[in-house]
Image (cartoon, helix red, strand yellow):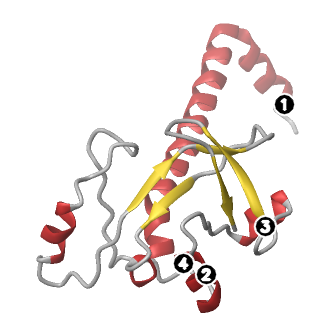
């Protein structure tokens, strides 16, 4: 390159300008990446669930649930096919520090609304009959080494007493 020495000389002539230029480029790159991740996070739910599902939460947060009577009001809206509810609660597997999300679900309507939730009918019926039953995804079951029928001690972190739940 014929002008490389001239370019380098002009770049290093004002060091503060060079540092500020590189810094502004780095900040712009960081913001672009951050906003791309935020955009992806906001649209991720529709990629999984589809555009025909509406999720509502309490305005205070995930832990505070909506009253169950709201389900009847939502069901009365024309075009609504099914309504279900989930309630997040925080527990850990006894003897482990890892956390994974756990939800109390509405067994009557959950599979109607969450069509991507695939559980064989015999396993679903066993889950519905067992009040201490739980369903775990294949990835989570492989991570902890669980099999169908295992008893898993769950340590309660927020509410009431500790119980053993069966998968």
The location of residue 21, given as percent across then percent down, is 61, 23
* Element marked by disc 1: helix
Q: Earlier in the sequence, mark 1 or mark 2?
A: 1
Dot 2 corresponds to which residue? 126
Kindly report the distance in space between the C-alpha atoms of the residues bearing marks 4 and 1: 77 Å
Dot 1 corresponds to which residue? 4
The location of residue 74, given as percent across then percent down, is 17, 70
Given contact means CB atoms under 8 Å apart, are the residues at marks 2 and 4 in contact? yes
Question: Can I make out residue 14 in this image?
Answer: no
Dot 4 corresponds to which residue? 129
Tell me the mark number nearer the camera, choosing from 1 and 2: 2
- Quadrant containing the N terminus is top right
The structure residue drawn at horizontal position 58% and vertical position 76%, both measured from the top left corner, is 127
The structure residue drawn at horizontal position 61% and vertical position 67%, both measured from the top left corner, is 133
* Element marked by disc 3: loop
Dot 3 corresponds to which residue? 150
């Amino acid at each position: 390159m014929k002008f490389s020495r001239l370019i380098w000389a002009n770049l290093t002539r004002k060091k503060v300008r060079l540092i500020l230029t590189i810094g502004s480029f780095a900040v712009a790159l960081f913001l672009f990446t951050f906003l791309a991740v935020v955009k992806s996070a906001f649209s991720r739910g529709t990629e999984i669930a589809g555009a025909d599902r509406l999720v509502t939460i309490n305005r205070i947060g995930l832990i505070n649930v909506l009253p169950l009577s709201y389900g009847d009001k939502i069901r009365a809206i024309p075009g609504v096919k099914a309504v279900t509810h989930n309630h997040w609660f925080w527990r850990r597997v006894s003897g482990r520090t890892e956390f994974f999300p756990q939800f109390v679900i509405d067994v009557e309507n959950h599979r109607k609304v969450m069509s991507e939730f695939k559980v064989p009918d015999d396993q679903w019926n066993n889950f519905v009959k067992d009040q201490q039953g739980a369903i775990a995804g294949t990835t989570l079951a492989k991570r902890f080494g669980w099999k169908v029928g295992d008893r898993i001690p769950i340590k309660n972190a927020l509410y009431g007493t500790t119980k053993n739940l069966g998968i």
